[in-house]
Amino acid sequence: MPSLVLLRHGESAWNARDVFTGQVDVDLTPRGEEQARRCGPTLREAGLLPDRVYSSTLTRAVRTAALALAAAGRPCTPTQDCRLDERSYGALEGLPRSEVLARHGAEQYRRWRRSWDVAPPPVRIGGVVRPGESLADVAARLRPCWEDVLAPDLRVGRTVLVVAHSNSLRALIAVLDGVGPDRVPELEVPIAEPLHYLLDDRARPLVPGGRYVRSLPQR
Ligand SMILES: O=C(O)[C@@H](CO)OP(=O)(O)O
């Protein structure tokens, strides 16, 4: 039966400093590396070693995938797809969350982080303007990745691991589970905790929301 495992990368340097990250390519902290490694045995014990591994193009996701699979005894280089990249947080990237909260207030802060259709403000780098992305924008770029890359692997019964980010995974979950804009704010994806979806042969979830895979207690 097709299995899809979604995994958010381990702690990054900017997660540790509580800074908006978006598409800035920061690396894992030593703690994040350890969190990634711990996912390997968890997947192996759950019988979820993947046939195919996809990640975003950002270092923290690529390295999480590589560290987890090496720790599971199945070293591999993930196939990178930029449609799995974190949302663009535009002008918020690099700002401490506490500063954004204090300057703009709780409601605007919540809209930028967790609404369906409010995009963070654009950022100008050199002469180039990069827009912020709403979750709806992220879902729009993810849908073709789901249809053309992930779902075809799943429909032939493969186990697929996707290593990505807080918001790209929230968008993918919204697409998979058909979560509407009103329930999108409730979606949260914890760091380095594999989320397993068992799917039918048309790659539709058998249990909405999937199930987090926990490691067996240490003996
Ligand atoms: O800053 C970011 O890019 C993301 C992930 O850390 O933040 P949030 O989950 O708050 O949207």
Image (cartoon, grey):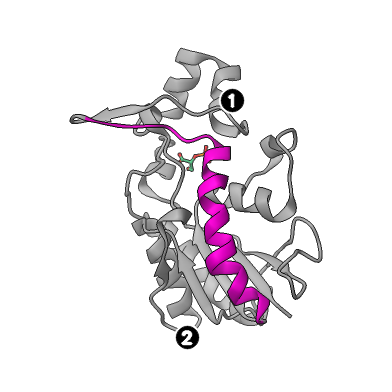
Q: Quadrant of the N terminus?
A: bottom right
Residue 98 lies in the magenta stretch: no
Q: Amino acid at mark 1?
A: Arg
Could you tell me which secondary element the residue under label 2 belongs to?
loop
- Horizontal placement of 179 versus 97: left or right? right
Kindly report which numbered mark, 1 or 2, lies closer to the viewer in this rendering: 1
Q: Relative to 199, is 104 above or below?
A: above
Q: Which residue is mark 2?
A: 73
Residue 25 x %, y %: 32, 49
Q: Quadrant of the C terminus?
A: bottom right
Q: Relative to 209, is 213 above or below?
A: below
Could you tell me which secondary element the residue under label 1 belongs to?
helix
Q: In the figure, residue 209 lies in which quadrant? A: bottom right
Name the residue rendered at 48%, 68% in the picture.
Answer: 54
- Horizontal placement of 126 versus 149: left or right? left
In the image, 146 versus 123, the foreground residue is 146
- Mark 1–mark 2 distance (CA, rounded to whole Å): 42 Å
Let me know if residue 190 appears in the view: no
Q: In the figure, residue 65 lies in which quadrant? A: bottom left
Q: In the figure, residue 94 lies in which quadrant? A: top left
From which residue to which does the magenta span run?
128-156
Q: Which residue is mark 1?
A: 111
Q: Relative to 150, is 105 above or below?
A: above
> In this view, which residue lies farthest toward the left?
126
Residue 189 x %, y %: 61, 49
